[in-house]
């Protein structure tokens, strides 16, 4: 028998091609703007599709250690940024005493994509010794959730749910 439980969204955050926070995203959506444009992050000449939704000119949040940010995959960095925003938006107190009671359940699809491309390029151009340490860890399904937990100091469970297009819905139901 299924148990009915309420779900409460306590805070929101966003890093998207339409905006770097929830307000900017909402403004762009309600104005009917598109986040799709010509690919600028790599040379797409000769590809059948040369448009995408890119987060351009991204800078990590000011409160995140720059060295830590450099070690994260770009997708995990976006997740950390959005989580920092969501925690601030929630106004919920997070302390070392209650951090053990706070966890992360995150829907993910193909985490570590930038890390994979960078590692493949380095491998083919300069051999296996050119690959950065931590390659495998940055590509696992739980990497974004673990990055969020680490950045926020959370000590509860950190779970990445990989269920294709249903990932976010499944993560919400598990949480």
Image: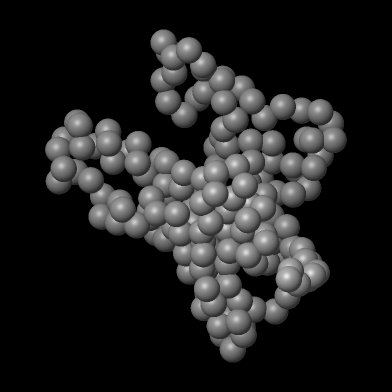
Name above or below for residue 49 compared with residue 35: above
Q: Nearer the viewer, residue 132 or 162?
A: 162
**106 or 76: which is nearer to us?**
106
Which quarter of the picture shows residue 17? top right
Using the image, determine if residue 139 lies above or below residue 149: above
Tell me if I can see residue 60 in this picture: no
Residue 165 x %, y %: 60, 42
Work out which quarter of the rendered image holds the C terminus and state it.
bottom right
Q: Position of residue 75 (x, y in %)?
A: 50, 47
| The N terminus lies in quadrant | bottom right
Q: Position of residue 6 (x, y in %)?
A: 80, 69
Q: Report the side of 17 relative to 2 (left or right).
A: left
Residue at 85% across / 35% down in the picture? Answer: 30
With respect to residue 163, does 106 lie above or below? Answer: below
Left-right relation of 95 to 134: right
* Residue 131 or residue 141, whichever sits in front: 141
Q: Is residue 58 visible?
A: yes
- For the point 67% across and 53% down, the residue is 169
Residue beneath the point at 44% across and 14% down = 47
Q: Residue at x 81, y 28 (%)?
A: 32
């Amino acid at each position: 028998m299924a148990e009915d439980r309420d779900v409460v969204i306590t805070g929101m955050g966003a890093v998207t091609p339409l905006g770097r926070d929830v307000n900017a995203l909402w403004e762009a959506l309600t104005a009917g703007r598109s986040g799709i444009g010509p690919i600028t992050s790599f040379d797409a000449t000769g590809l059948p599709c040369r448009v995408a939704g890119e987060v351009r000119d991204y800078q990590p949040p000011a409160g995140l250690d720059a060295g830590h940010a450099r070690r994260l995959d770009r997708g995990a960095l976006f997740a950390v940024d959005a989580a920092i925003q969501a925690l601030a938006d929630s106004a919920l107190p997070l302390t070392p005493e209650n951090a053990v009671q706070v966890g992360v359940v995150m829907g993910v699809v193909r985490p570590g994509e930038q890390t994979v491309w960078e590692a493949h390029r380095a491998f083919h151009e300069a051999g296996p010794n050119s690959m950065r340490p931590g390659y495998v860890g940055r590509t696992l399904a739980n990497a974004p959730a673990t990055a969020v937990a680490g950045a926020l100091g959370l000590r509860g469970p950190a779970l990445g749910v990989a269920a294709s297009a249903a990932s976010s819905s499944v993560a919400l139901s598990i949480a």
